[in-house]
Image: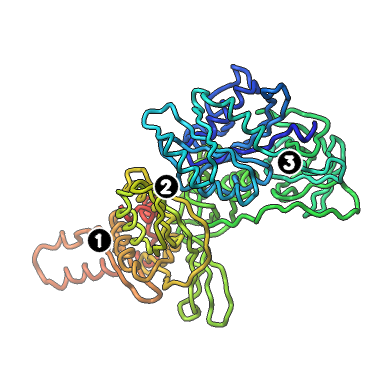
Amino acid sequence: MDQSRIRNFCIVAHIDHGKSTLADRMLETTGTLGEKQMQAQVLDNMDLERERGITIKAHAVRMAYTAADGTDYIFNLIDTPGHVDFTYEVSRSLAACEGAVLVVDATQGVEAQTVSNLLLALNGDLSVVSCANKIDVAGADVAGVHEQILDLVGDDEVFDISAKTGIGIEPLLEAIVDRVPAPAGDTQGPLRALVFDSLYDQYRGVICFIRVVDGSISKGQTIRFHSTGLEYEIEELGIMRLDRIPTSRLEAGEVGYLMAGIKELSEAGVGDTVVASGKAPIEALSGYQPLKPMVFSGLYPVIADEHEAVREALDRLQLNDAAFTYEPESSPALGFGFRCGFLGLLHMEIVQERLDREHNVDIITTQPNVRYEVLKKNGEVIEVENPSNLPTVVEIDEIREPILDAQILVPSEYIGSVMQVCNERRGTYINTEYLAPGARAILHYELPLAEVVIDFYDRLKSVSRGYASFDYDHKGMTAAPLVRLDILINGECLDALAAIIHRDRAFEWGKRLCAKLKELIPRQMFEVIIQAAIGSKVISRETVRPFRKNVTAKCYGGDVSRKRKLLERQKEGKKRMKQFANVEIPQEAFLAALKIDE
């Protein structure tokens, strides 16, 4: 295929602005799929994607398009997620493209994630084609959106479309032909192909999705992965048109897939360069920064016998999700489980739901926390993901927490409420930018990630009646007065409820958590003492009173020493029982920590 007639592009936008619906109309307009194959959000093939109406994984598809002048073109489209947790999927897709279609909802205007994804595209030197979607919806402010896009991109040519009804799709496709540059690879040079995504198939092994940058690649050819040096023979090569369609050869500029009997995802990492086997040194393509999980949580099976089933389920999930990590851990309260790393709370929620649906395992989740840096007094710096691994107070010089550079886009009437929420979460105000006079503003804050991971997004939506949108970048680590708050049950530390928390909030948090646990822990035959402590200092205490048997019921009058003797014996029995008995902690107690602000 002549490179000059290939266009590689992706669609970027905020959540719910119509990326997947626009992809549907493009597939329909180009005749890529028949009428029977078409359905809403056809590229979103996971059940969770369909139910939630969001894109979780990027999806690639090839389309044939005949332009107005009769020239045939090949379009390689990559539909990307919009949620901030899945920004890594967007960045991977952009590296395989020369252009991006920026979609803005005409009823909502530019949102936080619109700005973030646009910056990713501009940083990758992509040509941007802008369009205003949902122009046929009542309340659409098309002229206002044109002005916002002009301020944002400096693009005065904005295409008005309706992805639902198909209005304006044809002119947009013509604009992609005119404004997105053709690939500029060396067709005669040595093979270099970028692995921009991969997934694991239990029958065929790892399937690599590639963009051929230079040279060509053929079925049966022996290839080498640049970073690992491992060599494989290509068993199948092809293009993606919803289904995988085998072909014998891919040339520079084309997007497709390859299978080569690769057993593990680590052998064919995303961002690696595929080259032809041989000794000649070839410069690798610039790949991607390795992903670092930001939110950590413990996952424990409800039934201890299901530990191996949970391990197998996590293994399978990790095969198709490079951003998800896990390692074994144990807890005196919950037994054997796993410490898992996620990109954010939505990512964590998706993984939990997939464990439940696809693998039928019941799990208990501990309170999510973030990764801290601890500077010890001996000069050593360690990373701590689990509060129970925090060194003792006498060993610590300072604790550093991750800080976010946050942008909150909000209508001007809700600015006060949003600022109040940010200040409650230890936010540092930077500045305010107005997109249009008196209409919408972008608030810039520095926020600790630990204050965002639990319910910040929900609070933001509540105080702004759903109008605020939130985006963030990781700025760095900053020292803060943090302490480890332990929860003790009858003197034994319940490590699953331990938390690293700001010193100023520790007393209130401990008091409310103890009160919540008192409601949830059932009464025993002995006294249950619930304490919140920082180091050796107890800051809050609640007591669950025991059941009491009336041992003096049979004593009628007589010497009081007889009654006293029976009561003393009962007291000794309860003390002995308290030494050997374990308090049963219900699952709701672990969820209480997540809902403490309610």
Q: CA distance from mark 2 to mark 3?
A: 33 Å
> Please, what is the three-letter code of the amino acid marked with disc 1?
Arg
Position of residue 488 measured from the top left corner of the image (x, y, whole percent) = 38, 66
Q: Please give the name of the residue rendered at 48% of the width and 59% of the height, measured from the top-left corner.
A: 405
Q: Is residue 274 above or below residue 298?
A: above
The percent coordinates of residue 174 (x first, y second) are: 63, 29
Residue at mark 1 to residue at mark 2: CA–CA distance = 47 Å
Closer to the camera, 308 or 359? 359
Asked if the residues shown at circle 2 and circle 3 are in contact, with their CB atoms under 8 angstroms apart, the answer is no
Mark 1 vs 3, N-terminal side: 3
Q: How is the image coloured?
A: rainbow
Residue 446, visible in the rendered structure: yes
When asked about the image quadrant of residue 551, the answer is: bottom left
Kind of residue sitting beneath label 2:
Ser
Using the image, tell me which numbered label, if any, was put on residue 210: 3
Residue at x 49% of width, y 34% of height: 132
Closer to the eye: label 1 or 2: 2
> Dot 1 corresponds to which residue?
545
Q: Residue drawn 53% across and 78% down?
A: 376
- The residue that label 2 is drawn on is 469
Relative to residue 60, is residue 236 drawn left or right?
A: right
Check the image and name the residue furthest to the right.
279
Check disc 1 and report its element: helix, strand or loop.
Answer: loop
On screen, residue 254 versus residue 510, left or right, reads right
In the picture, measured across the screen, residue 167 lies left or right of residue 255, that is left
Asked which secondary structure carries label 2, the reply is: strand
Bin the neighbour count of mark 1 within 10 Å (Cα to Cα): few under 14, some 14-19, many 20 and up: some
Which residue shows up at 71% across the image and 40% down it? 209
